[in-house]
Image (cartoon, rainbow, N blue to C red):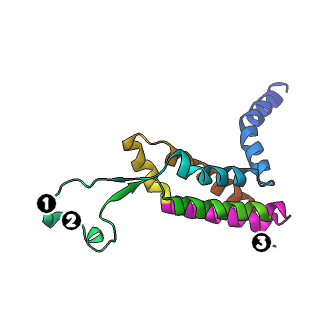
């Protein structure tokens, strides 16, 4: 009989960091941390243009023919960073104002949208030795999952 509670205690110890993170979604702190990281991006890791590789004229993809810019960027632009930072701060304020359900849904949605906008760029930045975009994507993924779980657990009542 004593072996069973020890196993349950070990399982609780293993799950306790996830429970602690989930418990933090009752507060605006994870969203504020993400907003602060995004707002500091233009200073800590500004985006830069990557010179295009020379390719034959006939092998240019159609998406690059009709795009405004022919050079790719590594990292997110200042406007994008400040926009998503503002959205995270608005969601944090919603939770601070005791609207947990809508604030959690708002933060989860904008975190997922950030992953759509900057997720692929974060992995391509590793090729150039830039890890900051991957940090931003990881924190946004954590916010999307944790606040999304909080939003879905409310039951839409």
* Label disc, if present, on residue 156 of the rendered structure: 3
Question: Magenta span covers which residues?
Answer: 95-117
Q: Which residue is mark 1?
A: 56
Q: In the figure, is residue 91 to the left or right of 57? A: right
Circle 1 Cα neighbour tier, 10 Å, few/some/many (<14 / 14–19 / ≥20): few
**Residue occupying image coordinates x 26% and y 55%:** 52
Residue 127 lies in the magenta stretch: no
Residues at circles 2 and 3 in contact by the CB criterion of under 8 Å: no
Disc 2 to disc 3, how far (Cα)? 48 Å
Which of the 4 quarters of the picture holds residue 10?
A: top right
* Residue that sits furthest to the front in the current view: 43
Residues at circles 2 and 1 in contact by the CB criterion of under 8 Å: no
Residue 96 lies in the magenta stretch: yes
Instruction: Work out whether mark 1 precedes mark 3 in sequence or the reverse, and give the earlier one.
Output: 1
Residues at circles 1 and 3 in contact by the CB criterion of under 8 Å: no
Question: Helix, strand or loop at disc 3?
Answer: loop
Question: Helix, strand or loop at disc 2?
Answer: loop
Q: Is residue 136 visible?
A: yes
Which image quarter is the C terminus in? bottom right
Q: In the figure, is residue 140 to the left or right of 102? A: left
- Residue 137 picture location, percent across and down: 54, 51
Q: Which residue is mark 2?
A: 60
**Residue occupying image coordinates x 83% and y 30%:** 5
**Residue occupying image coordinates x 79% and y 34%:** 8
Circle 2 Cα neighbour tier, 10 Å, few/some/many (<14 / 14–19 / ≥20): few
**Residue occupying image coordinates x 77% and y 71%:** 156
| Above or below, 147 relative to 20 | below
Which of the 4 quarters of the picture holds residue 153?
A: bottom right
């Amino acid at each position: 009989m004593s072996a069973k509670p020890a196993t349950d205690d070990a399982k609780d110890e293993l799950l306790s960091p996830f429970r602690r993170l989930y418990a933090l979604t009752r507060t605006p702190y994870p969203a504020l941390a993400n907003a602060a990281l995004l707002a500091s991006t233009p200073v800590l890791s500004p985006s830069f243009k990557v010179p295009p590789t020379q390719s034959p004229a006939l092998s240019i993809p159609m998406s690059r023919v009709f795009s405004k810019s022919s050079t790719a960027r590594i990292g997110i632009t200042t406007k994008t960073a400040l926009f998503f930072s503002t959205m995270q701060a608005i969601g944090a304020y919603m939770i601070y104002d005791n609207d947990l359900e809508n604030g959690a849904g708002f933060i989860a949605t904008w975190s997922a949208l950030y992953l759509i906008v900057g997720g692929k760029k974060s992995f391509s930045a590793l090729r150039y030795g830039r890890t900051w975009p991957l940090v931003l994507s990881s924190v946004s993924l954590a916010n999307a999952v944790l606040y999304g779980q909080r939003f879905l657990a409310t039951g839409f009542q």
